[in-house]
Image: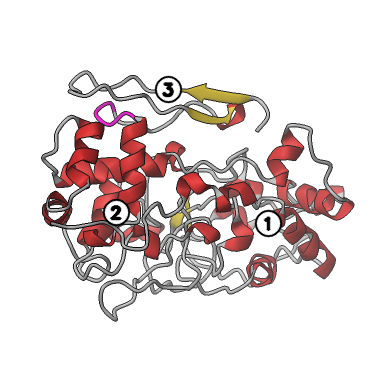
Amino acid sequence: MGNLFVTGNSKPVHAITDTIPYQLAYPASFGNRVNIPADNPLTREGVFLGNRLFYERLLSANNRISCASCHKQPFAFADNKAFSDGIDTVETTRNAMSLVNLLWVRHFFWDGRANSLEEQAAIPLSHPHEMGLSPDKGAVKLQHTDNYPALFRAAFGSDSITGDLVVKAIAQFERTLISANSRYDQYLNGSYTPTPEESRGMALFMNNPSPERNIRGAGCGHCHGGPKLYIELFHNNGLDSMPKDRGIEQLTGLATDRGRFRVPTLRNIAVTAPYMHDGRFATLEEVLDHYSDHIQESASLSPVLRSNTNEVGGKSLHLTHEEKHSIIAFLQMLTDSSFLTNPDFANPHTQHNHATR
């Protein structure tokens, strides 16, 4: 991954067992403004446990689904359909977001309603139409297995399983889901030379259009700039003039927040279809068509989209077919195959899951 930054986390002072700090490795360009609570440092034992809990179906009310049911590794821990199925036939109201590079994220979900991974993990566990079981009730089920008490003792110093420790372990595992080995990363560290089409797409992606100076661009970097390919902001990206889903307005009550959602990372974007908070676009071609020619005006529309045009006095971005094709070629550079197949992130359970008492 080029210039790596490697860090370990000191073990908690209250730990009874001798835990081993988990070593994180990521490009120095990602920065060290990471989000690790003081009361939940990463340990090898905690991550090992969290990996198992992420795939643990006992944490659902019907023992049939896990976190991984809606966040699937081959799709960069997103779902491959617009809305996910939980314990019943009621679909989720928003598309499952990709779980990638969460170590740097401060606000979770499309509307940013959770301020930590621990808080984020608890919400789908308890939601009546998702996993349908509070972490505390899930902890009771885990307590009556043969293997989990010892795993919690190794990770947290006690074989008394609580809901708080369940979400802490899951959060530890999710913080290790780092993707930084795409062809784009290899380009940044000098080990990959983009094709001419990828280079054209990269320039269009990064450039802000300036028709007066004869500079064509898509201005994607406004929201998806930087090495991590997202900026932690909330935007109304012109999907609807009257949004059915009010986005963060539901939390703030501000009309200026109507239809504003968190900007997702574009890493592994080629494998995370369908796209947008409601999964309305099935392909990257549809996404590019939207930004090029179908932005819907509204009072809360992101200002950068109002002024984004490749024509003097233009009202839309108006990319050519060839330009869209080149941008998609660049977006395909962002796929990290090693992340999608990393055995450290895969389902660790055997066919029979585990023995119960």
Q: In the image, which residues are magenta? A: 38-42
Q: Residues within 10 Å of mark 3 (few under 14, many from 20)?
A: some
Q: Is residue 314 left or right of residue 299?
A: right
Q: Label 2: which residue?
A: 252
Q: Residue furthest bottom?
A: 89
- The residue that disc 1 covers is 308
Residue at (19% x, 34% y) in the render: 153
Callout 3: SS: loop
**CB within 8 Å, label 1 to label 3:** no
- Cα distance between the residues tagged 1 and 3: 43 Å
Please identify the quarter of the rendering in which residue 326 is found. Answer: bottom right
The disc placed on residue 8 is 3
Q: Is residue 167 left or right of residue 228?
A: left
The amino acid on which the numbered mark 1 sits, given as a three-letter code, is: Asn
Considering depth in this image, is 106 or 297 the residue closer to the camera?
106
Instruction: Tally the numbered discs.
Output: 3
